[in-house]
Image (cartoon, grey):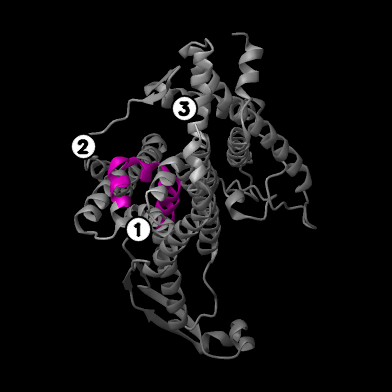
């Protein structure tokens, strides 16, 4: 098969295939913007140390996250983490219209295409869609870089629009994402057999998932818990600290994230068992059967949302630490009679982190909607058959709601718990302040500023040392959980709109 023919077949199809290509390209566009933003932050040069600038700050920017070299790595890492829900959305979009695509691939096999050609066709479809998205994303990045380059009166910039990543880095993102998408598609197709009679998948499971995800979660939490002792123990060894702490952070976060996502499959299976044992209504029993038949559906559907909630829980724990420290400093200042305020840098930085988490949850909600709608459309003949046998559509609607909510609620609680444990393992469990002497001038400002008179009004005040435990941010976690649950409910509402059209009796005659 000639390459031009292969490309033409990859871009052919119905409106559902077109929607899948567009959504995949859109996901690649968003991932490209996140990746290029991270590379731009990394590309900010660190100036040489001078007498006026011994800290080597990049003072051409407003934001301290860009000014201080030690904070730019964490900022770039946070931008890269935004790619996780975007890539999960791309994975959900790739499954859109899968039954119709399977029938089209079977028709190609019937026309004489080999299994290898059919596999290359699917891989090329995903790769071309992702390449289209990355090219558009590169164009949006370059145009936005020029439009947002607006120095203020002091010549400072709000964004690093004065730097550009290297050509190799740009090419790595623009060309690397389509290659990764194509390889991921080929990996997912390794258990798929396309024949002239249809597409079969060797994915039968006789037993439910095992609880092995708990080991990954425990390893991730333990990795974060040892970071602070490692920093104290090997603070003088700069070479060791340069790779050990980032490795513990990255490996621990990845292990915890994978453990939560895999653990959702275990939760789905056992939620189905509990529903089948204790439920009495037909809707819950139908949902129980679906949960036990495909327990990994919850892991695939909720993966992006759970990843965002893990980082949200960790950010909430960090905010609780900084908030407790700020509150203690304010109390110490008031006790000493000082009017100076505290440094709001860390709390204001957490506002940026919370904004990024909100964007990740919003993107994950889009993935939830795509996954639920795709599942309803893929099973439309089964739903139509149930309606034809007398099952009310309201029962099917409640079944879909049960199937989405039953694994989502415990999975959300698990993700928030793991994220909070990671955050509390990274930060101290208590903060301390005081323990010294402060000089207070009990007079007017003019008398206190005059060296001749200030001494007679000054007095020493002992500030006692205070230790305060960092509380668990239950309120912040409750808001995160409520937002995630609202996202699931919105997804169910959108999915039920497609359920009525998918249960029409005419669907029994579709092929």
Q: Is residue 171 left or right of residue 86?
A: right
What range is drawn magenta here?
286-314
Give the alpha-carbon distance from disc 2 to disc 3, as whole Å.
Answer: 26 Å
Residue 465 colored in magenta in the image? no
Q: Nearer the viewer, residue 209 or 415?
A: 209
Q: Give the residue at the far front of this rendering.
A: 389
Element class at badge 3: helix
Which residue is denoted by mark 1 in the rendering?
409
First in sequence, mark 1 or 3: give its number.
3
Question: Image quarter for residue 249?
Answer: top left
Which residue is denoted by mark 3 in the rendering?
184
Element class at badge 1: helix
Q: Give the residue at the far right of this rendering.
A: 153
Crowding at mark 2 (Cα within 10 Å: few <14, some 14-19, many 20+): few
On the image, the x and y values in percent for residue 312 come to 44, 56
Q: Residue at x 61, y 43 (%)?
A: 49
Crowding at mark 3 (Cα within 10 Å: few <14, some 14-19, many 20+): some
Residue 8 seen in the current view: yes
Q: Residue at x 28, y 46 (%)?
A: 289
Label drawn at residue 207: 2
Q: Do the residues labelled 1 and 3 touch (CB within 8 Å)?
A: no
């Amino acid at each position: 098969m000639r390459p031009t023919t292969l490309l033409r077949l990859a871009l052919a199809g119905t409106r559902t295939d077109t929607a899948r290509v567009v959504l995949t390209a859109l996901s690649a566009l968003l991932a490209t913007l996140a990746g290029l933003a991270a590379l731009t932050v990394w590309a900010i040069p660190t100036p040489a140390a001078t007498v006026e600038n011994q800290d080597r700050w990049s003072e051409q920017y407003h934001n301290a996250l860009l000014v201080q070299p030690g904070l730019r790595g964490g900022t770039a890492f946070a931008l890269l983490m935004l790619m996780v829900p975007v890539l999960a959305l791309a994975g959900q979009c790739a499954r859109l219209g899968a039954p119709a695509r399977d029938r089209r691939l079977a028709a190609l096999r019937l026309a004489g295409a080999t299994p290898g050609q059919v596999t290359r066709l699917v891989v090329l479809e995903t790769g071309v869609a992702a390449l289209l998205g990355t090219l558009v994303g590169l164009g949006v990045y370059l145009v936005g870089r020029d439009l947002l380059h607006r120095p203020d009166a002091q010549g400072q910039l709000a964004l690093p629009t004065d730097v550009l990543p290297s050509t190799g880095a740009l090419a790595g993102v623009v060309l690397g994402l389509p290659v990764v998408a194509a390889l991921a598609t080929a990996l997912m197709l390794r258990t798929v057999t396309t024949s002239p009679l249809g597409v079969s998948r060797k994915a039968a499971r006789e037993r439910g998932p095992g609880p092995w995800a708990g080991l990954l979660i425990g390893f991730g939490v333990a990795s974060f818990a040892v970071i602070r002792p490692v920093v104290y123990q090997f603070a003088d060894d700069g070479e060791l600290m340069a790779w050990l702490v980032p490795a513990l952070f990255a490996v621990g976060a990845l292990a915890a994230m994978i453990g939560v996502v895999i653990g959702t499959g275990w939760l789905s299976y056992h939620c189905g068992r509990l529903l089948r044992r204790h439920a009495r209504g037909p809707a819950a029993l139908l949902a129980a059967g679906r949960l036990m038949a495909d327990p990994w559906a919850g892991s695939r559907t909720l993966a992006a949302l759970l990843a965002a909630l893990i980082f949200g829980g960790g950010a909430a724990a960090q905010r609780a630490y900084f908030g407790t420290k700020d509150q203690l400093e304010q109390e110490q200042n008031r006790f000493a009679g000082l009017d100076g305020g505290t440094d709001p840098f860390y709390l204001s930085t957490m506002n940026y982190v919370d904004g990024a988490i909100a964007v990740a949850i919003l993107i994950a909600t889009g993935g939830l909607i795509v996954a639920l709608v795709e599942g309803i459309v893929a099973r439309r003949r089964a739903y139509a058959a149930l309606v034809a046998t007398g099952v009310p559509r309201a029962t099917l609607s409640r079944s879909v709601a049960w199937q989405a909510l039953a694994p989502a609620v415990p999975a959300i609680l698990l993700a928030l718990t793991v994220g909070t444990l990671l955050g509390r393992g990274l930060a101290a469990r208590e903060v301390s302040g005081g323990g010294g002497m402060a000089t207070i001038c009990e007079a007017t400002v003019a008398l206190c500023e005059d060296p001749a008179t200030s001494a007679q009004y000054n007095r020493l005040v002992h500030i006692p040392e205070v230790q305060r435990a960092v509380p668990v941010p239950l309120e912040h976690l409750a808001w995160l959980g409520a937002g995630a649950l609202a996202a699931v409910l919105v997804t169910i509402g959108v999915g039920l709109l497609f359920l009525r059209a998918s249960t029409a009796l005419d669907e029994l005659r579709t092929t």
